[in-house]
Amino acid sequence: MSHPPFRPFPALAALSLLTALVRLNGAEIPPIGPGEFAVGSTNLEVTVPTAAPMIDYLNGKAAGRQVTYLSDILAHRETALLLNIDVPAEPKVFNSQAGIRIPLVLYVLYPTAKDNPRADYKFPYAETGDNVFPHMQGVGEKPLFADPHAKYPLIVYSGGFNTHGLWHLWHLKVLAAHGYIVVDLFHGDNREPSFGTAMAVRPIELRAALDYVLNHPEFADAIDRDRIGASGASAGGHTILAAMGGIDPSGNQPPAADPRIKAGVGLVPFMGGVFGVWPFTVDNWLFGKDFSGLKSVRLPFLALYGQKDKNVPPEGVEAGVRAMSGPTIAVMLDGETHLLSNAAEVETFTWEVLFFDAWLRGDARARQKLELGTTVRGGTSNHKTIQRAAP
């Protein structure tokens, strides 16, 4: 009995062709495009302050009992995304913040229709990478999603210590343009009495932000709750690793695992280190000096780090990634310091979007590119240093 010749399914044939092309091109990954979607944003209109510099409101500031924060200058508190965080009553961990309630401002970027008629809003602060909120919602306006019936994957973002949401706006627009709802937090770190306190409060803020958005009447139905990722830069890398299950073996930082998060990306991710100059040094090994607290991270994680970064040394990132138990990838950005060049940051976008497409969307082509590629083609040099599947 004869059988017809075997013909692979179209998707399998495409994957085989993609594998061959990646190998043929020397494992180079082509850069991603600008994204198919226009981007909309929630309201973040402010009144220009006169009592203190704008940076004090963006980063937060505490002077005795006087606390300054972005919520103080919101023009439309009822329209902006503003919530309150109850800090646990644990003075040993949270110091003067223990047991108090603090405000937290969020903004959300999302895929919107290309004919969205809403105007952009230029935030009145220019000393930052990007200050334009695209198609910003006005008072009483609801989000205009590209597809009002779709459910989109969500990424929650945590920035570096003493940075603010505007620093990351350009980056997050890229994620939204590729079909993700993105939630960013204005941590206001400078409200906290110490670095350790800020690092303990941050995961609580991240969890509260997720709770808030997932239950928000205008976003709840648009989010795919099974496809939630987290991304963070510098200290934000620690924040998301704590949310992914990383623990402090000393017990100084409380456990903060959030099972809703399925994958994470860290850009120059802080995993622990020593601050100051001897003999005036402070240990901040928040996952243990041997990174043993990262063994409990079993979720997919991508680390993007600078070869010449003195704030987050590359050997520390590599040791931290190797300590994790889940699927991991580390990519070195050659010649880059802690503050990345614009060209290098553009190349990180390709790695990040591929990673989230692979692990949140289950995109087989993205997974294939991610596994076979060793560098993203572009203006700066970058190369994969670690790649490990889950044991």
Image (cartoon, rainbow, N blue to C red):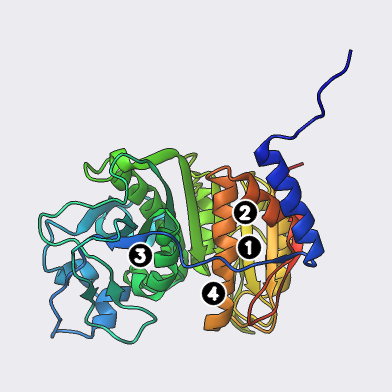
Q: Are marks 2 and 4 in contact (CB under 8 Å)?
A: no
Q: CA distance from mark 2 to mark 3?
A: 22 Å
Q: Are marks 2 and 3 in contact (CB under 8 Å)?
A: no
Looking at the rendered structure, the secondary structure element under dot 3 is loop
Q: Are marks 2 and 1 in contact (CB under 8 Å)?
A: yes
Does 342 appear above or below 331?
below
**What amino acid type is highlighted by mark number 1?**
Ala
Q: Earlier in the sequence, mark 3 or mark 4?
A: 3
Residue 93: image x %, image y %? 44, 56
| Neighbourhood count class around disc 4 (C-alpha, 10 Å): few under 14, some 14–19, many 20 upward | some
Q: Residue drawn at (62%, 67%), measured in percent from left and top?
A: 304
Eye-nearest disc, 2 or 3:
2
Q: Earlier in the sequence, mark 2 or mark 3?
A: 3
2 and 334: which one is in front?
2
Q: Residue drawn at (53%, 70%), measured in percent from left and top?
A: 234
Looking at the rendered structure, the secondary structure element under dot 1 is strand
Eye-nearest disc, 3 or 4:
4
Residue 344: image x %, image y %? 59, 78
What's the mark number on residue 303? 1
Q: CA distance from mark 2 to mark 1?
A: 7 Å
Eye-nearest disc, 1 or 3:
1
